[in-house]
């Protein structure tokens, strides 16, 4: 699934002491010069570690670094930690448990570490090689590089430790194009599967990062080898600490899809994006931009916040019971078409989502998928699919979707089964697990959902997608093969709610819970299993709200042009968001105000 980024108004501006910001180095030449200078100061021989995430271009970085070192008369030797891993077939056998036979999903490796994939004999060989260098007479620096290189068995040998980080989206591009180099490989593994990353390798990388980063000396932003940045880890810690005290904006992402629409063209300039199905405003695997000084901006994964300040950001309960999880995500589902289109073009797949117990049992995830649809814009023909019609034969529906998928043929009378709701701005649909639903088009939907997965894996079980072609982003046309269905999961989860029950329980209504002369707050009615509530703050000039130090808030501006979100206790902790932008307000922020910056 292609992903496009939008960095407009995404920078989080923080204040650090000048002696800290001076240590943030921007640019590849300056970064590599600094590393060379740091290595020059070491006693020689010495051994250093370059640990890091998937997708780091080690070849380009090390080639440039050794070239610079050579001009300084510094003898640098490199050793790829990939040779410490077990043979590929042994790693494949280890991962099989997590990849499972399920074609659409896997099972999270919830306890494994990189140590599980390391060969003791090979690790001993690397250790012996490092000790040989240290006991020799050559005045050289040995760099042991690659994910896992800061292994416990080697840690005592290192004089300096660097962590090279990469954000999710560019790494995923490498994976989809067959260019990703996984554990134990010296070059790309063309058949590397997405489930390997989402259900196993991500968690091994993340646990290694949680272990390696706090004890590293330097943090390197290594998203692009031509745009490297470096800072000492104590400065990173100070940066994250400051950021955790204020609302956090993320880099928004966009993806095309078979129901993709065109409202985005009126709002943003996204080069290369022809149609937009999903626009993610907040989520677990999005990245963040942090400006520590003018011209000094660090791009890093949002999850770095949780390594140091997890409880402050997401709240004590989530941090203790679902460590590493950002439990909320926000989407903006496009649905504008300049000309009338059939429902089979404008609609999402007919689908449902699982609850917490189901994802624990089947996928080893900590939290179910609980969704809401808030209609943020509505056009002629705005509508949402949810529940089944009162007279629909539900057994026949199951038979029809199974036969449709088997024969690869559409269901001509599918509308006789699925209930349809005309919508308007301000409507809110609650979507608990097991509820058949789908965005019907001719509207823009603000989805405010739980995120079940630390790595951002979403659990949507497709039951029917009209047997339509999907979007081919290479050809920029709707000529891709139809999307895969997840019929067993869809049917297992389905609660078979009919439209009367949906009207009574899931068509939420707002109620005023606070009124002042400056602002008022309304809260939408909810339904028992939903683990969060939707509230709106209405104001002309300013409003107030509070986290009560309990949980992270996802604040989205749905009306107006621009607002300031500012701590009441410490006004220096603030950010500005535009219309259709979200900020994550950390649980520890307490009382905050919303100030209208529009004319």
Image (cartoon, rainbow, N blue to C red):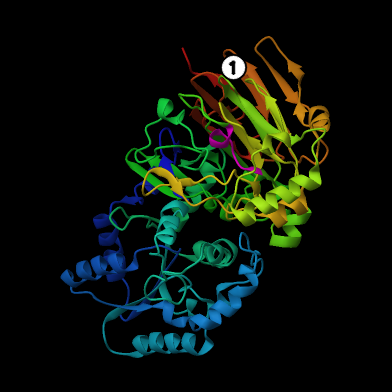
At a point 47% along the width and 24% down the height, the residue shown is 339
* Picture layout, residue 369 above or below residue 217: above
Q: From the viewer's perspective, tell me whether residue 59 is left or right of residue 393.
A: left
Residue at the (38%, 63%) spot, across then down? 56
Name the residue nearer the viewer: 234 or 548.
548
In the rendered view, tell whether residue 542 sits above or below residue 248: above
| 581 magenta-colored | no
Q: Quadrant of residue 178?
A: bottom left
Q: Position of residue 568 (x, y in %)?
A: 61, 27
Left-right relation of 512 to 185: right
- Residue found farthest to the left: 71
Q: Would you name the residue on which mark 1 appears?
A: 542
Query: Eyeballing the image, is 499 above or below 552?
Result: above
**Res. 319 visible in picture:** no
Q: Secondary structure at mark 1?
A: strand
Relative to 329, 47 lies left or right: left
In the displayed structure, 39 sits above or below 104; it is below
Position in image of residue 504 (x %, y %): 83, 28
Expressed as whole percent of the image width and height from the top left, the position of residue 394 reads 80, 43
Picture quadrant where residue 230 is located: bottom left
The magenta-colored residue range is 343-350
Q: Depth check: 533 or 66 in front?
A: 533
Q: Quadrant of residue 143?
A: bottom left
Q: Residue at x 66, y 56 (%)?
A: 323
How many numbered marks, from 0 up? Answer: 1
**Is the residue marked by circle 1 packed among few (<14), some (14-19), or many (20+) residues within 10 Å?**
some
- In the image, 303 versus 365, the foreground residue is 365
Q: Looking at the image, can residue 419 be seen?
A: yes
Give the image location of residue 540, x and y in percent: 58, 12
């Amino acid at each position: 699934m292609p992903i496009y980024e939008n960095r407009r108004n995404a920078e989080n501006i923080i204040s650090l002491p000048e002696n800290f910001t001076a240590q943030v180095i921007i640019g590849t030449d300056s970064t590599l010069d600094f590393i060379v200078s740091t290595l020059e100061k070491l006693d020689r021989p010495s051994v250093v570690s370059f640990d890091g995430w998937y997708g780091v271009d080690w070849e380009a970085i090390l080639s440039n670094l050794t070239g610079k070192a050579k001009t300084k008369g510094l003898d640098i030797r490199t050793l790829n930690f990939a040779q410490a891993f077990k043979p590929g077939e042994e790693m494949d056998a280890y991962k099989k448990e997590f990849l499972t036979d399920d074609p659409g999903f896997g099972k999270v490796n919830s306890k494994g570490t990189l140590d599980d994939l390391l060969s003791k004999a090979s690790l001993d060989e690397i250790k012996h090689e490092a000790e040989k260098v240290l006991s020799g007479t050559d005045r050289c620096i040995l760099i042991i590089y690659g994910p896992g290189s800061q292994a416990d068995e080697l840690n005592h040998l290192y004089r300096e430790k660097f962590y090279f980080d990469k954000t999710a989206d560019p790494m995923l591009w490498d994976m989809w194009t067959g260019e990703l180099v996984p554990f134990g490989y010296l070059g790309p593994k063309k058949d590397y599967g997405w489930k390997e990353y989402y259900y196993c390798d991500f968690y091994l990388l993340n646990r290694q990062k949680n272990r390696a980063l706090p004890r590293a000396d330097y943090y390197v932003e290594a998203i692009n080898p031509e745009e490297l940045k470096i800072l000492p880890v104590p400065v990173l810690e100070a940066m994250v600490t400051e950021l955790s005290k204020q609302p956090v904006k993320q880099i928004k992402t966009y993806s095309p899809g078979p129901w993709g629409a065109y409202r985005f063209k009126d709002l943003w300039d996204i080069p290369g994006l022809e149609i937009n199905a999903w626009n993610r405003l907040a989520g677990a695997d999005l990245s963040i931009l942090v400006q520590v000084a003018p011209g000094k901006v660090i791009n890093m994964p949002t999850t770095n916040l949780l390594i140091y300040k997890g409880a402050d950001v997401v709240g004590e309960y989530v941090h203790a019971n679902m460590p590493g999880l950002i439990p909320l995500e926000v989407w903006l589902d496009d649905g504008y078409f300049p000309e009338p289109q059939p429902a089979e073009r404008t609609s999402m797949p007919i689908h449902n989502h699982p609850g917490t117990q189901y994802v624990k049992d089947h996928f080893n995830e900590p939290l179910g998928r609980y969704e809401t649809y808030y209609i943020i814009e509505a056009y002629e023909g705005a509508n949402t699919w949810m529940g089944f019609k009162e007279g629909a034969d539900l057994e026949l529906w199951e038979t029809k979707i199974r036969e449709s998928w088997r024969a690869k043929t559409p269901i001509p009378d599918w509308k006789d089964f699925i209930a349809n709701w005309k919508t308007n701005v301000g409507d809110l649909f609650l979507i608990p697990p097991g509820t058949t639903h789908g965005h019907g088009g001719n509207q823009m939907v603000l989805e405010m959902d739980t995120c079940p997965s630390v790595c951002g894996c979403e659990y949507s079980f497709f039951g029917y997608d009209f047997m339509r072609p999907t979007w081919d982003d290479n050809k920029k046309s709707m000529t891709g093969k139809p999307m895969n269905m997840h019929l067993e999961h869809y049917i297992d989860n389905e609660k078979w709610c009919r439209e009367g029950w949906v009207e009574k329980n899931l068509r939420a209504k707002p109620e005023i819970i606070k009124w002042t002369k400056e602002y008022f707050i309304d809260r939408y009615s909810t339904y028992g299993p939903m683990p969060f509530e939707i509230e709106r703050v209405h104001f002309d000039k300013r409003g107030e709200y509070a986290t009560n130090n309990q949980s992270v808030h996802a604040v989205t501006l749905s009306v107006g042009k621009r607002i300031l979100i500012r701590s009441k206790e410490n006004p220096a902790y603030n950010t500005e968001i535009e219309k259709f932008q979200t900020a994550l307000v950390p649980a520890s922020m307490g009382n905050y105000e919303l100030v209208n910056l529009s004319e």
